[in-house]
Image (cartoon, rainbow, N blue to C red):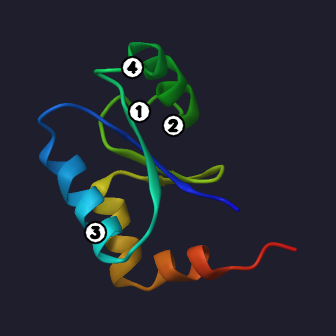
Amino acid sequence: MKRIVIYTGNLCGYCAMAKKLLNEKNIDFDEINIHKEHNKIDEMIKLTGGRKSVPQIFYGTLHIGGCDDLYSMNSNGELDKILNKEIG
């Protein structure tokens, strides 16, 4: 089963907001704090195509984007669609 992975940083309000939304929706996620796991910074930048800001959110190989992208996907129903999609 695919999981949400969220790359975060220390003292990041947008990271806190993204995690709050995921928790409110009872969506399990794996958090990678790039300030605690420095070796993950290059991995995140490669996966995002060059983005260096946090949070960066993924569902499997799908790059959702940052906090604003997550909230936008939630408000237009797209987040629920991708999370509920059955993969054959």
**What residue is disc 1 on?**
51
- The residue carrying pointer 4 sits among few (fewer than 14), some (14 to 19) or many (20 or more) residues within 10 Å by Cα, namely few
- The residue carrying pointer 2 sits among few (fewer than 14), some (14 to 19) or many (20 or more) residues within 10 Å by Cα, namely some
Q: Secondary structure at mark 1?
A: loop
Say if 77 sits above or below 47 in the image. below
Disc 1 to disc 3, C-alpha distance:
22 Å
Task: Pinpoint residue 39: horizontal percent, then vertical percent.
Answer: 47, 14
Q: Amino acid at mark 3?
A: Leu
Disc 4 to disc 3, C-alpha distance:
23 Å
The numbered mark, 4 or 3, whose residue comes first in the sequence reads: 3
Say if 35 sits above or below 61 in the image. above
Q: Amino acid at mark 4?
A: Glu
Instruction: Examine the image and state in which quarter residue 54 appears.
Output: top left
Say if 5 sits above or below 45 in the image. below
The numbered mark, 1 or 3, whose residue comes first in the sequence reads: 3
The numbered mark, 2 or 4, whose residue comes first in the sequence reads: 4
Disc 2 to disc 4, C-alpha distance:
17 Å
Disc 1 to disc 4, C-alpha distance:
17 Å
Disc 2 to disc 1, C-alpha distance:
5 Å
Task: Pinpoint residue 36: horizontal percent, then vertical percent.
Answer: 31, 21
**What residue is disc 2 on?**
48
**What residue is disc 4 on?**
37
Q: Secondary structure at mark 4?
A: loop
Task: Check contact, mark 1 vs mark 4: CB within 8 A.
Answer: no
Q: Secondary structure at mark 3?
A: helix
Quarter of the picture holding the C terminus: bottom right
Task: Check contact, mark 2 vs mark 1: CB within 8 A.
Answer: yes
- The residue carrying pointer 1 sits among few (fewer than 14), some (14 to 19) or many (20 or more) residues within 10 Å by Cα, namely some
Any mark on residue 21, and which? 3
